[in-house]
Amino acid sequence: MKKWNRREGQRPHRRQGAGQRHGWFRDNRRRSTQDEQWSDAGPSIRASQRRYENHSVSSSSSSPSSSSSSSSMASSAAPELPGFYFDPEKNRYFRLLPGHNNCNPLTREQLQEKEREKERNKMLAEDEKPRKKAPRRGLNTSLLLQRRHLGLLPENSYCRLVHEVKVSGMRRHKLEIQSTDNSNPNTDNFRLIVGDSACERVFTVNDVSHGGCKYGIMNFSSSSRGSLSVEMCDNLYFTNRKVNSICWASVNYPDSHVLLCLVGVADTPGCVSLLPASLFSNSNPEQPGMLCSFKISSAWSCAWCLNPQFDKTFSTGLSRRVIVKDAETGRTQTYSTGSDVLAQQFALRVPVLFNGCRSGEIFSIDLRQRGRRDQSWKASRFHQESAITSVHVLQDENYLLAADMLGQIKLWDVRVTKPVQEYKGHYNEHAYLPIHVNEPEGLLLAVGQDCYTRLWSLKDGHLLRTIPSPHPAANDLIPSVVFSSKLGGCRGLPGLLMAVKHDLYYFPYNTDYQEGGEQQAGF
């Protein structure tokens, strides 16, 4: 048995004590410097901080955890003090300065913006990884194929789930926009993009730096390998008015025209313009076609009817009224409402117009019933809790999707006027944001006010993916998106098109997408 040595028994004790004293003095000097810098925090804050540190030390000694989890637990366990915030990295409180200007280094809004930007960069890094998280637990292509071969999965369910797997694997690629005028690169931010039914053309609206906006058409073409090329039209039109709403119109042939709602400014009155798509190309030998401008001011929304009985009819939603007009004969029918009409869409099989109001009311108008009074012309009506920003009629026209300014997206059964499905996760407080539906793939898309693009399963409301914006979030930099089963025409592949700031991005289904097929050019 080894004899106890007094020096060996006490030397580690002395060395440990000396290290503790040395570390205590060094840490004390650091804290004294910070206390002098933030002396306005007051003795009460430092006392509460010491009580919190003692509590955190005792809790950490009883249960070990990782550094990342302990920092998050520390920030959540720290008592909230009015006028101060707790920094888990520095383990102390700091005073929040009042105001919203940039002169104050610490405000609650700046801290929240910093956290949001940190989360966005984290999600962008996750999106760059080749292997992404599956949209559902245990869902992958090989497992679906195995279950399909065994007869355990119906064909419709198999196709829908395969699309969900493909959506989760989409990666971002930046597109270069070709133009005949290469000396004039695009520096104006995209505000809105709307694709036609074949998704070969996309109507674009860009904000102009000196005020107003410009609009035109981008032509898309896809190769057999799946590469996508973009060409901007020759003619761009400028206006000092604001474009509130856009829809494609089928006057002479499918998507032959574009219907625009322009809001008046100063001495320039607002109007609704019906423009031929061929007007935006100098190389098109065809005649421009019918060009109309209707004196309808302050229109919030518009829609074009594709039903054969009213195939030249369009509608506009205004303040407390709806106007239905025949583009050829000029015949007009006006319906008075109790609220501003912010969203509209026609059904296809029957000439019924669905409207969404600022009050949260959703009602339908049957164009075959004329001359009714006291709002008895409303075929059906139901309500959501906030202003309606978008409505979409499904192929089964007994169902309607509606989104509001509380971030709620609901699927309604029009026959019983009750919601049958809700899609959670969308964020909106006051913005006029559309929703996008692709029924062949069973997908619902929406861009939130937080600049995140979210995709849900249309069938069960499951959130499949959240795509962050490539640029920092801002109210004037909310992305505009287009999703199509055949992006770029009949040879195209399913994919997502995203316009944000002055850039255009493509999220294709195929993971081996080659950017080399794109040509470098300006806007």
Image (cartoon, helix red, strand yellow):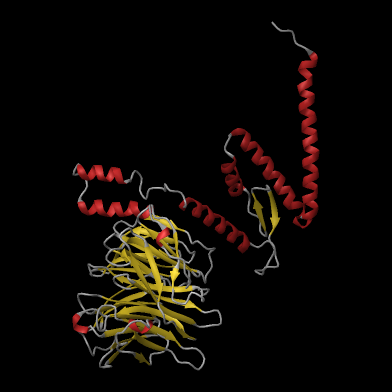
| Residue closer to the observer: 379 or 501 | 501
332 is higher (above) or lower (below) than 356: below
| Residue closer to the observer: 215 or 398 | 215
The outermost residue toward the top is: 1
Q: Is residue 156 left or right of residue 221?
A: left
Q: Quadrant of residue 26?
A: top right
43 is higher (above) or lower (below) than 28: below
Image quadrant holding the N terminus, namely: top right
| Residue at the image position 25 percent from the left and 53 percent from the top | 159
Q: Quadrant of residue 56?
A: top right
Q: Is residue 347 left or right of residue 234?
A: left
439 is higher (above) or lower (below) than 295: above
Instruction: Count the labels in the image.
Output: 0
Q: Position of residue 13 (x, y in %)?
A: 77, 23
| Residue at the image position 21 percent from the left and 85 percent from the top | 369
| Residue closer to the observer: 107 or 207 | 207
Q: Position of residue 238 (x, y in %)?
A: 47, 84
Res 338 visible: no
| Residue closer to the observer: 212 or 337 | 212
Q: Is residue 480 left or right of residue 354?
A: right
Res 293 visible: yes
Q: Position of residue 250 (x, y in %)?
A: 27, 80
Q: Position of residue 501 (x, y in %)?
A: 50, 69
